Amino acid sequence: MGTDTECSGRWNHIRRLLERGGPFAHPDFEPSSDNLTFIQETCRILVIGAGGLGCELLKNLALLGFRDVHVIDMDTIDVSNLNRQFLFRPKDVGSSKADVAARFINTRVPGCKVTPHHAKIQDFDESFYRGFHIVVCGLDSIVARRWINGMLFSLLKYENGEVDQTSVIPLVDGGTEGLKGNARVILPGITACIECTLDLYPPQINFPLCTIAHTPRLPEHCIEYARILLWPKEEPFGAGVAIDGDNPLHVSWIMKKAEERAEEYGITGITYRLTQGVVKRIIPAVASTNAVIAVCLTSCVFHNSCCQPLNNYMNFNDIEGVYTYTFEAQKRVRLSRCSLQPQALCFCEEDKLQDVITYLTESTVYQMKSPGITTSIDGKNRTLYMQTVKSIEEKTRGNLKKTLKELGLTSGQELYVADITTPSSLIFRLALSTSMDTSAENSLNAAN
């Protein structure tokens, strides 16, 4: 492999963009040789995810001259990854994706240093994320997207009510689903964020339980029958053992039971791959889609230095021909999970705590997974409900059936809500009334 000194002119194509102006340049862009120096010696980029998108991103960023790149991924390499995640080889199966991807790029691209982190994004604190100039996401988890979105918002600083631009760390996010994909640029506190556009994510496909149990018509119905009904009933691998979609024994057992069910109803098409796909909610990945979206994301990162950024959401679809569409996603004005100020939560004093939990989980604004609620009553901190810790859930379960009045809650009281989708608690100021019409007000708030 050559080095920078041996490859004269290696960065000429980048210099043409960074050392001269043009019609697509950002109004504040100043052409200079210092721009390439910044990219190569100063800029620190965090890539979250080393899967289909992550591999493409690491390759693109390294070839563009970014040298200080960190990558986070908690997964290990599986045989099924090898057809599209080109940084991995058969000998790497079972190894950390982050470690192998970093080693491959560092070996292949002279001068580039990729630092791997085999961990969850939740394992790092604010000081870690504050050390990067830009964050690029290639995730397949909405929960993880929401968490990192919340983390970057928590790093914002304000002066006279306005966002301090120096505290903004751009988030470049992309996703693929078969032959569809999207790319977006989020400037925390300035543009629409993940929380503002939750309704753009497609809902997870679920089959009606009555169809699964009584009138199956598809092979997927038979697989779900074995997964949902037979597994907890027969407990094939012991009491309380959860299904592991990566365990061949578990998947094979479900496939066998699904085949028996399918034969009974004359249904064909049960395979191991389909069974695992249903169990893990896998949507087939397409390498070409990953490549297209990764190019868009990399361009957004590079354009942050010299060109107008994507404004701010791009859709891609090549099911029939090639179609792209760019639009500006709008911020939610009235309510936002990313607000740093206490937000109003309007309920009737006769509503039960369960009604509050339901609102937080089903609201288009909040859509939490397992909210835990804490408040201060009579000067003492008190946990009203927490689902994530078994012992606390058992002690607070009875509160779900109590009314807000019975729990001692009053108007103006602040509720602190923690959830796996956010790194910090959300603060709500409770507004209680004796009227049942507050549900309509909550619905209006959620719609806005």
Image: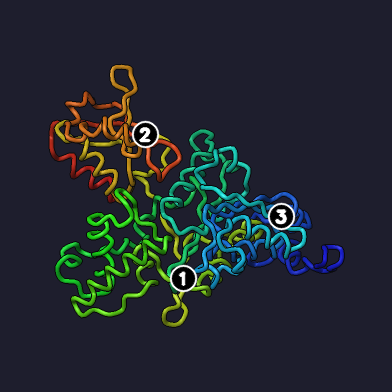
368 or 93: which is nearer to us?
93
Left or right: residue 29 compared with residue 425: right
Disc 1/disc 2 C-alpha distance (Å): 39 Å
Which residue is denoted by mark 1 in the rendering?
Answer: 285
Q: Are marks 3 and 2 in contact (CB under 8 Å)?
A: no
Q: Is residue 311 above or below residue 70?
A: below
Q: Quadrant of residue 167?
A: top right
Q: Could you tell me which residue is drawn at 17 percent across and 26 percent down? A: 406
What residue is drawn where x is 50% and y is 72%? 289
Give the structural element (helix, strand or loop) at label 3: strand
Please, is residue 278 above or below residue 439 in the view?
Answer: below
Residue 427 is tagged as 2
Q: Amino acid at mark 2?
A: Ile
Residue 77 is situated, as x and y percent measured from the top left of the image, at 54, 61
Q: Residues within 10 Å of mark 2 (few under 14, many from 20)?
A: many
Q: Secondary structure at mark 2?
A: strand
Name the residue rendered at 31%, 32% in the picture. Answer: 392
